[in-house]
Structure formats: C-alpha cells, structure tokens
Amino acid sequence: MSSARTNLEKLFNPSSISIIGASAREGSIGFNLVQNLQISGYAGKIWPVNPKYPEVLGLKCFSALEDTPEAAELTLVAVPAENVNDVIRRSCEKGARMFIIISSGFDEVGRHDLTHELLTILKQYNARTLGPNVFGVFSASSNMNATFGPPQVRRGNVGLISQSGALGVALMGKSVSDNIGLSAVVSLGNEADISEGEALEYLGQDPATEVIFMYMEGCKEGRHFMEVANRVSMTKPIVIIKSGSSSRGALAAASHTGSLAGSDKIFSAAIKQAGVIRAFNLTDAFNWTRALANLPLPTAEGTVIVTNGGGVGVMASDSAERYDVKLNDNLEMLERIFRPTMPAFGSSKNPIDVTGQARNEEYGLALKASLEEETIPSVVGLYCTPATMDVLKFANTAVEYTANLRGKKPLIFSIIGGGSVPEAIRILNEHNIPCYETPDEAMSAMGVLYKRWKWLNKEPGIPEEFDMDLKAIRAIIDAAHEKNQTQLVESDCAEILRLAGLEFPKTAIARDLDEAIKASEDIGYPVVMKILSQDIVHKTEYGCVKLDLEDEREVRVAYESIMAEARRHFPRARIEGVTITEMVTDATEMILGFSMDQSFGPVLMFGMGGIYVEVLKDVSFRVAPISKQECEHMVKAINSYPILAGARGKAIRDLPKIVEAISRLSYLAMHTPDILELDINPLMALAKGKGCKVVDSRMTISKVQRNKNMEEKA
Amino acid sequence: MSSARTNLEKLFNPSSISIIGASAREGSIGFNLVQNLQISGYAGKIWPVNPKYPEVLGLKCFSALEDTPEAAELTLVAVPAENVNDVIRRSCEKGARMFIIISSGFDEVGRHDLTHELLTILKQYNARTLGPNVFGVFSASSNMNATFGPPQVRRGNVGLISQSGALGVALMGKSVSDNIGLSAVVSLGNEADISEGEALEYLGQDPATEVIFMYMEGCKEGRHFMEVANRVSMTKPIVIIKSGSSSRGALAAASHTGSLAGSDKIFSAAIKQAGVIRAFNLTDAFNWTRALANLPLPTAEGTVIVTNGGGVGVMASDSAERYDVKLNDNLEMLERIFRPTMPAFGSSKNPIDVTGQARNEEYGLALKASLEEETIPSVVGLYCTPATMDVLKFANTAVEYTANLRGKKPLIFSIIGGGSVPEAIRILNEHNIPCYETPDEAMSAMGVLYKRWKWLNKEPGIPEEFDMDLKAIRAIIDAAHEKNQTQLVESDCAEILRLAGLEFPKTAIARDLDEAIKASEDIGYPVVMKILSQDIVHKTEYGCVKLDLEDEREVRVAYESIMAEARRHFPRARIEGVTITEMVTDATEMILGFSMDQSFGPVLMFGMGGIYVEVLKDVSFRVAPISKQECEHMVKAINSYPILAGARGKAIRDLPKIVEAISRLSYLAMHTPDILELDINPLMALAKGKGCKVVDSRMTISKVQRNKNMEEKA
C-alpha cells in the first residue's frame, strides 16, 4: 500500500529539478516553470537546461542536459514533442528516473508511435513519467510549484488532480478566490505512464492532503481506480467532477443490461460504492470541497438552522429535504436552549428565527448556544443583511461568539445581501466557517457532510461465498466454446443458473397428452405448455406456447392446438413432446443480470422488469463483488422498491430471496470471466416465503476462453 | 386591463409623500425612509410627520398629519400597530387614498382584529394600502426609494416583488453586486389589501419593467394570479422563486388526486402553464433574471459553444443536455465559419475549440464569426484563464469583437479562473454579456431563454366546447344534495360520466342465471359478473365479483358462487340480480380526475394507474380549462408516456380518446363547481381505435349547492 508513496515520492519532493527547455523569454512555458519554482520558494537545486541561454532568471543555464552537476531527482521536459524521447533517453543514461513531460504532441494528436517509444525507454531504465501534455505538479510540502500555472497558490489541505490542462490551470486560479487552500496539484495529461489511480493513491497517503478534488474525463483502469478510491475514502473525502461520456463500455446495445448501463452510469455507481462524492458542476464541487476541507463530520442527524429571516429559513428547510438533511425536532430542547437568546416574537422551532430585529449579540448568543448544546450535531446559520446594519460587524460577531467551539461540529453559513456581503463571506471563510451566497448552497454542503458520514458509518460487509459447482458451470461454457457459440442455448443458460443456485418454476417433460395431463396435475394448476422441439423457434409467435391452463380440459385443448400449429408451421420439425411448467402467478417481474465492463469488470444490474424497465429505466448498478448488505441497498435503490416492499396492500415480495439471487450472481460473475453478459428477464418475485424464479434468461460468452486460469485456481 | 395601472399608479408615481412616524434618529426606520427618498432623488414633496421633531434631515416635520399642506398622494405609515388604523382614518378624512403600512403587528402576530378594522376603513373611503408589515416600494421612473432597504439601488429593467421582508431587503442589496438593475421593488407583506396579483399586473404594464422577479411563499388567489401571470408572460418574462408548501390545498388526503397533488405541485403546474419560469434556488433565480434582462430571445435551436479549453467544452455539452439546449451540428457550416479563426489543431466541431494557445484576437474572431453567421441562433462562450494571459484583456477583446453584434442573438459567457476573473466577469456583464463563473450556469441561463422562446411559440389553443347535458348532470348532483350525500353512489357517478361523454365497458343487468348467460353472450366473452344489490358493499372482498369468465360453464359456476357468498355474508340483503360487464383486456390502467383547489379552482390530474401511480407518482397536473393541445401535453408529460405510445412492441393506445377524455373532464370541471373531486381509477386505455373506458370512479360533491348560479347562466 505504500508503493505509490515510494514510487512517486520524487515527483512531489525532489531535492533537485532539471528544466529541459528552460527559457529566458518572458511569458514562455520554459520561463514560467523556472519562475514559479522560484516564487514558490522551492529550496532544492534548480538546473535550467537550454543551449540558447547562459542564464535564466538569475540561475546558471546548462547548454546540455549532460552538463548538470548530477542527474536531477525530477526532470521537467518542455521541448518539442519530436525531441522528447531523445531527452528522456539521455537523462536516463545520466541517471534520471522521474520525469514530467510538459510537451504536447503525443497521443492527443495521434502520435501513438512517440508514446510507444517513450514507454519502451521508461521500461528499459525503470523510470517513470507524468504526462505528456501536462501543466505540471505543485507540492506544498516541498514549496514546489513545478507548473506553468498561476504563480500564487493558496496553501491548504486540498489535493487537486486534473485530467484537463486548461481547466486545471483555471481551477488552480479559482481555488484562490474560492478560499480553497491546496496541498498539491497534479496535471495528469495523457497518462502514458502514471495514472489517475496512482496519483490518487499518492495523495491518499500524503500527510498534507486531507481532501482530494479531481476533475476527470475518463477512467482507463476503472477497477483499479475504484479500489484505490475506496481505500483513500476511508480516511479522506474525494470529490470528483467528471464530464462527458465515453465509448468505453463494451456492452452490446441490444441487450437490456448493455443499453441501460452506459459507461457513465457504471462509473457513477462504481465511485459511489467507493465512497467518492460526485459533483455535476463546478459550483457544487468547490462548495463541497470547501466544507469538507474545513469542517469535522457530524456525529448524528438533527441539524439546527439559525436565521434572522423567516423566508430564508423556509428556503433552507426546502433545501434540507432536497439534500436529505434531517432537521432537529426536539422542540423542548430547542425552546430551552434558544428562547433566552431571542426577542419575544422569535421562533424557537427549527429554523430558529431570531428575527430581523435581533441585534448581532442576540444572533451570536443563539449561535453559541447551538454549538455548546451537545445534542445538536450540526448548525446552519442564515443571515439576511438588513439595510440598517453593518454586515461586517455581524461577521465578526459570528466569528467571536463561536471561537473555541467551531472544531467540534460542522457550522455552515449563508449571507444574502449586497454591499460588504462578499467581504463578510470572506471573513467567515477565513475563520473556517464555510459561508455561501445562498441558503441552498449552505444546505447542499451540509448534505455532503452527512453523505460522507453515512458512508463511513455504513455496515461493512464482505461478499458472500457460495458452494457453487463452478467446475460444472465452466464445463457448459467450454462445451459452448467448442461449438463456437457466443450466445448460450436456453437449456445451457438455465442449467448454469440452476448450478448457481437460482430457482426455476417447477417443470416436466411430457411425450404425449396423457403425460401432459399427469405432469400438470403433479405440478398443480395453472400451468404453461410449450412445444418441445429443437427445430422450432419463436414458439410464442407460432402458437406453440399456451399460458394459464387451469384444468384437464384446458390442457387437452392446448395440447391439440399446439401440435396442430407446430405441424402446420414446421412440417419437418422433430417434435419431442411438450414441457409443462408451473404458471407463476401473483409475481412481480424483475430484471437481474451482469455484464463485463472493459474498465470496471463485472457490473451487476437490478430493476423492475417488463415494459417499465425499458421506459422508466428504474434500475440500479453495482460493481461486483458486493456484500449481502450492498445487495439489499441495490434492491432498495430502485424507485419502485415500495412495490416489492408491499405498497398499497400488495403482498410483500420475498426480499431475502431477491437479495440472495443478486448475491449469487455477484459470486457467479466474479468466478466466470467468460460470461460477458447475463440477463435474467423476467425474474419473478413471488410473495414472501415463496422465492423468486427465473422465467427467461440470456447469456453471452467470450469468443476466446478465459476460464482456464480460473479453473486451475479453483 | 389597465385597471391595475390606474389603481396603483400613486403607489409608484406619487407627486407627494407623507411619512407618518418619520424620525430624526439615525438608523431608525422612520429616518431611513426619509433618507432613502432624498438619496434616490425623489422630486416630489416629502412631508415628514412626527410631533417629536421640528425637522427631519433638513425637511420641515409636521407635528400632526392634519398639518401637512394637503393630503399626500402616498402616505407611508411607520407608527406602532395600535395607532395605524387611527392614522389611516384621519389621513382618509384629509383626503389620502394610497398607503404603505410599514408597521408590523397585524395578522402575523394574530391581530386579525386590527386587519379587519383596517379593511373596513379602507372600504369606507375607497382607499388602498400595501402591507402591513412591508419595507416599502422603490420606483425607478419616479426616483422614489420609499423603502427602509438599501439606499443605493442599481437602476435597470427588473421589477422585484417580495413576499418576505428580510429577504426582500437582502435581495435588493444582492441585485447591486449581481449586476441586476431594478425598475421597481414591491414589498408585499401581509397583503391585507393589495395582492401579489395586482402588484404583478402593475409591473406587467409598467414601461420601465422588462423582467419580473418574484419571491413568493404562498398564493392566496391562485387563479387570479395565474391569469395575470399568463397575460404578463406574453410580453415580459417572470421568474418566481417560491419556498415552502402551504396547507392551502383543500383536497382530501384519502383520495388519489388529493394525496398526490399537494398545493406546491399545483402551484408549479399552474405557473408553468402561465409561462412563468420557476427557480428552486436564489442562484438560478438571479442568473436567469440577468440573462432575461439583458438578452434577446433566440429565434431557432442550434447553440454554438466557443471555448479555449476542451474540458469545459465537454462540461458545457453535458449541461446542454441537462437544460435541453440543442447544439448546432451543421458541421459543414461550422468548419467554413470557424476554421479560419483557429490554430490548425483547433476543433471546428461544436464545441468550437480554439485551444488554450489561441490568442485573444483569434478567440475574438471566432466570437465575431459566430455572431455574424445568421444560421447560428445563439452562442455560449467559455474561457479557461491561462496563467500566462491577462483575463482583463480577454474580456475587453470579447467586448470589442462583439460590439454592434450583440443585440441580435443571445451571447452568454463563463470565465473560470482566479486573479482578475471577477473583474473580467464584471466587464462582460456591464456590456450586457451575462457572464457566469461556471459553464453549467451559463448553459442553464441559455436553457431558460429557450424555455421562454418555446413557451411563446407554442401553439395557442382554446378549450374545447362539448355538447354535454349539464342540466341532467346537475340534476343528479342536486338529488344527491337533497339526500345529504357528499360521496355520490356508484351509479350516479357513472351516469354523470356517461353524460359527460366518457366511455364505459359494455354492461347489462341480469335478474337470473339465464339472463346472465344471455347477457354474457350478447356482450361477448370474457365478462365480469358482479352482484347487484344496494345492500352489499365491498363486493370484491366478499366474493361477489368474478372476473374473466370465458364461457357459459364459467358463468354458471360464478353465478352460483356469487349468490352463495352473498347469502352467507348478507342474509338480509335484497338481491336484484347480477351485472354482466365486458372484461377489458389488453388495456393500460390510467388514472384521470380533477379536484377543486381552494386557490386555483379545478385542477386536472392524469397519470398511469394501478400500483405505479402510488409508488412512482407519475402524474401530471393542469389547471382547467385547457385546450386540446394542452391535454396532449399533459399526456406526454408523464414519464411512462412511451408505454402509451407503443414502447417495445406493445400496441399504441388510443391516444386521441385519452386526450378527449381529459378535454371532456376539463369542460365538466369548469361547469360543475359542485363536484369537489372526481377520480376515474382505472381508466382503461385500449389499443388505438378502441377507445378508453371508465372501470371505476368516485366523486365527492360540496355540502352546499353551488350550481344554482351556473344553471341560470347555462
């Protein structure tokens, strides 16, 4: 686990830096790199290299990289793309092992050949590089601004990782005005070598970094990234803003799982599982990061809102519901705590309204009381600036009355108004009270603290192990491989699911009418009758399936009808008889499956079946394997969950069996890499205690065998 | 229509103002009112009244209101609540007719008696008042800041109406820093007399006001407000932010329509119908208002994004989808227009990426080209601030290159970065280029322009008229009134719907088994059999309903069974026979109804029926009456609409008949005020051409008759 730390240490804390392509021309990248290193107070050695200049910014400039006193611990490369690999090779020869390739002109313009050559060189020398096509690295702990981004960086505890160069530079700038202090900045660029996962892992172990803010556009190694994110999330919050959708998903559009998934949904599900907080716009991303970087997490639900205006109080209550922040409703406690702090016509019901006529001191006392009262776990303060009062004085009062109390529970503010309000907001932010322009933003930030608190406190769980005959399952798949099938036949599909422990409706084969009647009676009416013939496809369409047969008479009629239709449409078909199957009634149609995502591996899907899955797309995703608890969450995550839980008098479904079915599929997916896709549709959920049964399923397997290794391990 | 203008003219443009309760004490409300009038440059007469002071802020102060030279055209009242009515009466005696009651202490503290007395006085003198409990009125056209809010107001074209005092004052302040200029501000307070609808109507006719921004908490006279909003929206955009939910809805929680509606949903539906743009947080409200106040509407879809960073381009594209902004995909045109303006590796695909290496002039040329090209209807510019460039120079370039071109189509900007970015944003805003901190906000503002454009361009439609026997319908209701029924019996309910032109499954009454068999054959199998007895309730629960009877044999069995059950459970019931009804198969269950909202009047509801309506709440609302087109929109508005439109091979439903059913209910609702609530559940939608049929319905009528007047008119 400390490998990333060790591996990338020199990228963040080198004792010497070469800048190949340093420049004395103001405004150039080679100039800015040297200048930013100087401005940031980097204490190590700085060795500019460029034959054109004797010195750069007062530093001796070397005419060739071979001339530097020794190999630098970190080499910045800012020369034309065509020359980069030569520079890397020569630097490696001299002993350099860590690079930042600033230069663009590689994969992003189609020059995969240059990347290929680069990787060969790195491998040869066991060297590493960030980039190409990056703006550099900032590291607060070594006072190193090795970027051509903004020279002034606000120091703090937030690590910024960006897959976009232009945006990354702009975000570095914006962090200053948004009161967000940075511990480190990493520009990922093309990720020819060092990946987003490795960068994240490093910052996860960096003592100066307490919160990580990532801008992402894609995720090459989803599963690895997710594992790292999950580890890091245990101790540090990660806020990710990801844009766009990629064509990474390998799922066939025709299948349910595939068409519903889309790689962005999988990404979203995966990082959520890993505890990552995903923002969908920059405002949220900055707002949330600021709260996470400055505040302790709450230790219970029951937020108190203190306000000097009823209107904003109501708005904040609306937002609380929107962001799932539970408000404190201990009226007795609230009255006891807050009544003494407010005018007679104030309200001690949450929101605590000290009214617009409250003086700063009264508001301050209410705030102080809210922080002192131990049963109040978190506080949101709202302030509408009256025209007759000095908002700066209010801000200072708020700071003063909460001094020494702020570190114990989260306190978030919103101040609305003009004049000095931006300055008042700045004052609160400077004192680690995240303050926003609107009540909605304040409550949204509080919502994120609770989201993280809940994730950290959720029951841990390990994936269940099942006693599944994996050998038999793989034998079926191997046999299909032999026959060059990629789509398993119905019976193979059913057999695999049976071996995986899923339940099916009772069924029997009948060679003639008498057997059909007997089978129907054994199974119990109503039953379904289906032609049994390998030569007949689209059975339903050709009248070879009859549903809901309720007695012997109906079985007789159905049998004659099916045989007649079969002979009419398929005169040459070999007919082996019919299958008689239990008719599943009082069941809720669901869909369950998994598919093999190229980036994230096996991804499970669960949802309501039938026409609703198509139209309402009411499905949930998880990256396998997942624990039994997570299977439960997956079931509860769909909007139609109340239908399964017995809404409006409908009998509750057999939830434990649904959960077990998901858990078994999770296990199956992890042990059969050859199954690229599996859809059970419908999976019929019966009433409590009656199980859930597979009615139809489809399975796609890989063209080439992947099982071999697994089998040896199994 | 000009009544509001005439009525409230003196509230906004008085030639003289008395301030009863003026004060020389700095910081007091009575002081601020006088001071703000002076600072704003009000040119009319100002008459402070207070026996305590000989003068206030250099103005002669009168010791009694009777002492002023004449009755002021507008009287501000800022005395203790107990004295207000006396002041009003005496002012009216002197001839005053328009008041602003600043004082609080009326309804909001339970003093309804004071309000009642106030209204009596106003009525007696035919006088009007704003308030009580307001911060005043600002009117740019008469340079009148008659508020105790901020003295400095940015003048512009936005009219602000606030139901909250504290928030209203804060919003006035915020408008300055948010670059929003105000034409008028109205604080509504308790609305004892002048309502939100009247204030809206006035600003709708005020030439200085081009956009209206409202903060609302409740809506007393919903229907009137909606009608005004609809009229005003035709010429001026209205942005409303409404908080909280009220208990205004008169719908019984037990019924479907009622429990699903909730007054906030009805409010939302109503103002959307009226073309109002509803914001759910202050950030959106301000952002959208700024765009609407500064930009022309687009005239077509096909927005072009110009950017200097790929990452923000992707983010903006994501946002475009989120806010339903269609991006231009005329690749040939885009290549022709933009290729000449960008470096070789730039992209002319939308987003147009001039790249981070583009100089200001290149970006400026791309902007200019986008504005000059007539087939591009709207433009979003994105800028990531590079560390090496001066963002202020960029802002000035953007202003310069778009000069004389900006008024023709909307141009919206987002600039990301630190340093001088806030100043750069200010420069663009000053030049009527709404500029935001994030691409998402820019695209959201563009989305609102398109939303308004679409509303203005939607097909107008008038509600359909039907040849309905309203007299017969009212006779049924009147008969129920005679019997003191509020819940109509099943047969009455069905008869009303039949008279309203809705369709029912074929049905017949059978007195004995033979008749039942004959009726079943006449109607056609399968059929439903139900006991016919006024004395038997909960028929299904007691086994007195049998579904899906497929032949004579099943009819016989069902008949015997029903009779046996009926006799067993209800030995004394008078049994008249059974009803035989067509069994509706291959149908989609829907729910359709209306309820009489106390504020908005008849509100229609449509949605998917069955268990889904409860769980997924997939319903749409409209305030009746609505046109046929709007009925169609109502059907299309539900998420499950694709199911009705024939998703995944399921036959398309009879959409014209569904639309007709809604339209008929709209007509019925408007002509039968005695029906408080009507639920058709389920309404069975059959395949195209086969209609939609009422299977069950419930109707609640008022306790007292309201029909009488209607009947006379009819």
Image (cartoon, coloured by chain):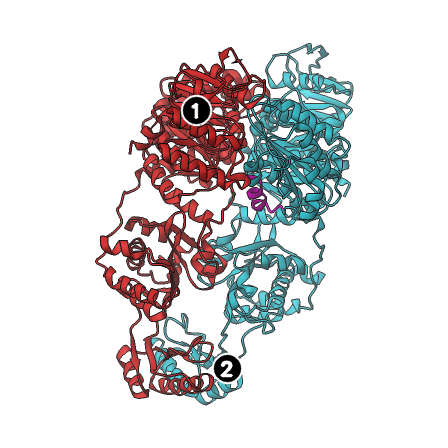
Chain colours: A cyan, B red
Q: Quadrant of the C terminus of chain B?
A: bottom left
Q: Which residue is at the front of the view, A143 or A434?
A: A434
Q: Are discs 1 and 2 less than 8 Å apart at CB?
A: no
Both marks 1 and 2 on one chain: no
Mark 1 residue crowding within 10 angstroms, few (<14) / some (14–19) / many (20+): many
Residue A449 in the image: x percent, y percent? Answer: 66, 42
Residue A149 in the image: x percent, y percent? Answer: 62, 23
Dot 2: what SS?
Answer: strand
- Quarter of the view holding residue A318: top right
Dot 1: what SS?
Answer: strand
Residue A63 in the image: x percent, y percent? Answer: 69, 14
Determine the main secondary structure of the stretch shown in magenta. helix
Residue at the image position 56 percent from the left and 55 percent from the top: A620
The stretch of residues the image draws in magenta is A315-325
Residue A390 is a magenta residue? no
Residue A509, labelled with which disc?
2
Residue to which mark 1 is pinned: B75
Q: The disc labelled 1 sits on which kind of residue?
A: Thr
Residue B202 in the image: x percent, y percent? Answer: 36, 30
Q: Vertically, is A61 above or below B436?
A: above
Residue A292, labelled with which disc?
none
Kindly report the distance in space between the C-alpha atoms of the residues bearing marks 1 and 2.
Answer: 94 Å
